[in-house]
Amino acid sequence: MVNLHTSIGKFQFNNPLMNASGVHCMTAAELDEVAQSPAGTLVTKSGTLEARAGNPEPRYAGLALGSINSMGLPNLGYQYYLDYAVAFQAAHPDQPIFLSIAGTGPADYQQMAEAIQASAFTGLTEFNLSCPNVPGKPQIAYDLDTTARILDDLFKVFKKPAGIKLPPFFDLAQFDAMADLLNRYPLTFINSINSLGNGLAIDPATDTALIRPKGGFGGIGGAYAKPIALANVRAFRERLRPDIAIIGTGGVTSGRDVYELILCGASLVSLGTVLQKEGLPAFARLTGELEAEMTAKGYDAIPDFKGALKTL
Ligand SMILES: Cc1cc2nc3c(=O)[nH]c(=O)nc-3n(C[C@H](O)[C@H](O)[C@H](O)COP(=O)(O)O)c2cc1C
């Protein structure tokens, strides 16, 4: 039997798999289902200051090798998820939980950080700086100055374990610049990657874009994203302080994909599109496939191969 135990900071997990924010985590009922699955932990939908209805439908479509979405951050408001997380902790003191937060502008982050700081929440907070799907709003993490301003303000008030969700980067100079910036802050983790921003998918029968918002443009997840996710996790693992853990997200459809994200340096791996497509049974399938892969490679435990990618 292999041991799937992993950790981030002082938080311990008995399985590296979790849901990706936005998938199976909108309501307390969905969050409870993830908590009761084989997943090692769970994250809420990204909550905003006020509840949002999101973009008009259709706003998600499954594709042959993944998905496209432009949800526009539909959510029940961050207070709903904060209340859920506090109640969850009281009921499951040994099970860590992640609270995801998204601003629709820089000022929102500090306001929500103050409220979370003042609350009874003792879990991990993920500040999502990478939502590509709010019409008229640029993705924050592609703007280093704005990212620095948000993190400066945030860490003045926020003293609890915190991480940020990043978009994919494509240039080695971007990895250098973002890692230099992130290394200045008391981050516990980063989560890499959010969807590949602004792809386009077309229905061949009607020559029409598959989703309605933004003229059909939307974030791409699933197998399309895997090589980019591997590269982002690897690039940040090589550049970030060793005490900043990485949650690997993007492109997982098999246990081998989970294994490869860990090989690149991920401590936890989250499931987005595959969970949307397969539902909760994805956790048991991928756990079994990860165990088989580790057994085939002769590894008993996650630390044995975490970050152990070989290069030529
Ligand atoms: C329907 C949907 C909603 C999403 N909503 C969020 C969100 O609220 N917050 C967030 O950080 N990421 C969100 N994401 C991005 C996922 O968390 C994940 O980063 C991305 O889909 C890549 O993973 P995948 O290849 O496993 O799908 C969403 C993705 C999908 C498909």
Image (tube, grey):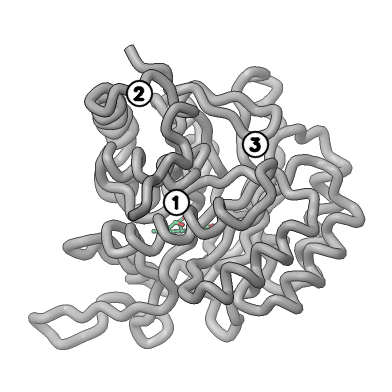
Return the x and y of residue 107 as percentages of the image width and height. Answer: 81, 70
Return the x and y of residue 140 as percentages of the image width and height. Answer: 64, 74
Q: Which residue is mark 3?
A: 84
Give the amino acid type for the residue marked by disc 3 in the picture: Tyr
Number of residues whose C-alpha sits closer than 10 Å to that of mark 3, classed few (under 14), some (14–19) or many (20 or more): some
- Name the image quarter holding residue 63: bottom left
Residue at 27% from the left image edge and 28% from the top image edge: 297
Give the amino acid type for the residue marked by disc 1 in the picture: Thr
Q: Is residue 185 above or below residue 71?
A: above
Image quarter in which the N terminus is found: top left
How many numbered circles are shown? 3
- Name the image quarter holding residue 10: top right
Q: Nearer the viewer, residue 295 or 130?
A: 295
Q: Say which label, 2 or 1, has the lower sequence index.
A: 1
Q: Which residue is mark 2?
A: 299
Residue at 51% from the left image edge and 56% from the top image edge: 192
**Distance between the Cα atoms at labels 2 and 1?**
22 Å
Looking at the image, residue 90 sits to the left or right of residue 217; the answer is: right
Give the amino acid type for the residue marked by disc 2 in the picture: Tyr
Label 1 beta carbon within 8 A of ligand 1:
yes
Number of residues whose C-alpha sits closer than 10 Å to that of mark 2, classed few (under 14), some (14–19) or many (20 or more): some
Q: Which mark is residue 249?
A: 1
